[in-house]
Amino acid sequence: MTTPTTLPADVARDLAEFSIEVPSWGYGNSGTRFKVFGTPGTPRDPFEKIADAAQTHAFTGSAPRVSLHYPWDKVEDFGALREYAAEQGMTLGMINSNTFQDDEYKFGSLTHGDKSVRRRAIDHHLECIDVMRATGSKEMKIWLADGTNYAGQDSIRARQDRLAESLQEIYLGLGDDERLVLEYKFFEPAFYHTDVPDWGTSLLHCLALGEKAQVVLDTGHHAPGTNIEFIVAQLLRQNRLGAFDFNSRNYADDDLIVGAADPFQLFRILFEIVQQDAHRPASGVNFMLDQCHNLESKIQGQIRSVLNVQETLAKALLVDREALAAAQTSNDVLLANDILMDAFWTDVRPALAAFREERGLPANPFEAFRASGYEEKVAAKRVGGNQMGWGA
Ligand code: LRH
Ligand code: MN
Ligand code: MN
């Protein structure tokens, strides 16, 4: 394929409809267990995080929602936060529960052997449903840090049973138009077994709960070599892929910028999405970022991420699917592969620049944001006070 200067109309339409949800915590300081480096101008409260997220949207036109983490983003009045977001042209997205930072959850939360700890963890999730209602959100994301470090530490089976029971109670708290998504992760912080380590476990719990429960796939939560696009295809086939946490990894749960470590993997994932029309809003799949910008500027990192997803989605949409189907039918292995690779290697940047300009957006959102002076302005204004960090 030669470099296109404009996008085909159907591709442009799909890209115009496609949106990405950004994480509030992506705008706060984060780091490793060794050091958290601060960045000048880092938000001091959830309102400032939303103001920064609104920049990502203003420059890309594709990131109109902010996902909140509770209680990291706890405020007195969620209605006021919602109104503030609306003034900034944003809505509040998925509410992430958090049962991984309290001492009481040292040995588990929804799986804990002590009923009173489970009660507390269930109540926290019911409170998240209240937060959903106050913020206008319809979705809750559950990621559990629960697990054990040593063989024999606890009964794997009993923990599954307790988890199923706890989830059931949370599920019953959902309204008809609300849903929960259950995120899996193969290790960390637990190092021997994790209670929701893989898509199969998450799916089994979701199937037991009902249609308002779906799986969330965080791209960083798999063992090296895992074929993530296969999982995507399978979950979509079952209508149980609720959301993505996009990021990229070289080693473990690195939370680096999506598409940075392995752009081809992102392409393969998005091609499975496109083949099942799951990129369309009607599919209900929430495409979110879950990233931590330890070294780089946070808003620039978020803008880069949105652009990476947009560019890669454009490539996936450009695959000649008719020709691919014909090559597949005739078992022409190399032609089929060539058709896919042709789209992957196509430089869509000039066509996307034209697409953005047509919509009144900067041709290069990344450069335009850097030149806007926003970062310098907030760095001067937000001195003093506590910068919010991961876990603040
Ligand atoms: C866990 C996780 C989960 C949390 C987020 C901060 O590793 O991916 O989604 O909510 O990180
Ligand atoms: Mn995640
Ligand atoms: Mn993670």
Image (tube, rainbow, N blue to C red):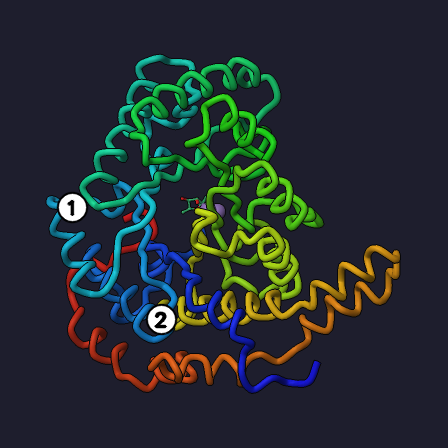
Residue 34 can be seen in this image: no
Q: Crowdedness of circle 1 by 10 Å Cα count: few (<14), some, many (20+)?
A: some
The mark lying in front, picked from 2 and 1, is 2
Query: Which one is nearer the viewer's eye here, 330 or 334?
Result: 330
Residue located at (18% from left, 41% from top): 134
Q: Nearer the viewer, residue 387 or 259?
A: 259
Which quadrant, please, contains the N terminus?
A: bottom right
Q: Is residue 18 visible?
A: yes
In this rendering, position of residue 143 left or right of residue 40: right
Q: Residue at image x 51%, y 69%?
A: 308
Q: Amino acid at mark 1?
A: Phe
Q: Position of residue 299 (x, y in %)?
A: 35, 69
Q: Quadrant of residue 63?
A: bottom left
Q: Where residue 225 sits in the image (x, y, percent)?
A: 71, 49
Q: Nearer the viewer, residue 203 or 155?
A: 203
Left or right of 16 in this view: 332: right
The three-letter code of the residue at mark 2 reads Gly
Q: For the residues marked 2 and 1, what is the alpha-carbon distance in whole angstroms? A: 25 Å
Q: Which residue is mark 1?
A: 78
Residue highlighted by disc 2: 61
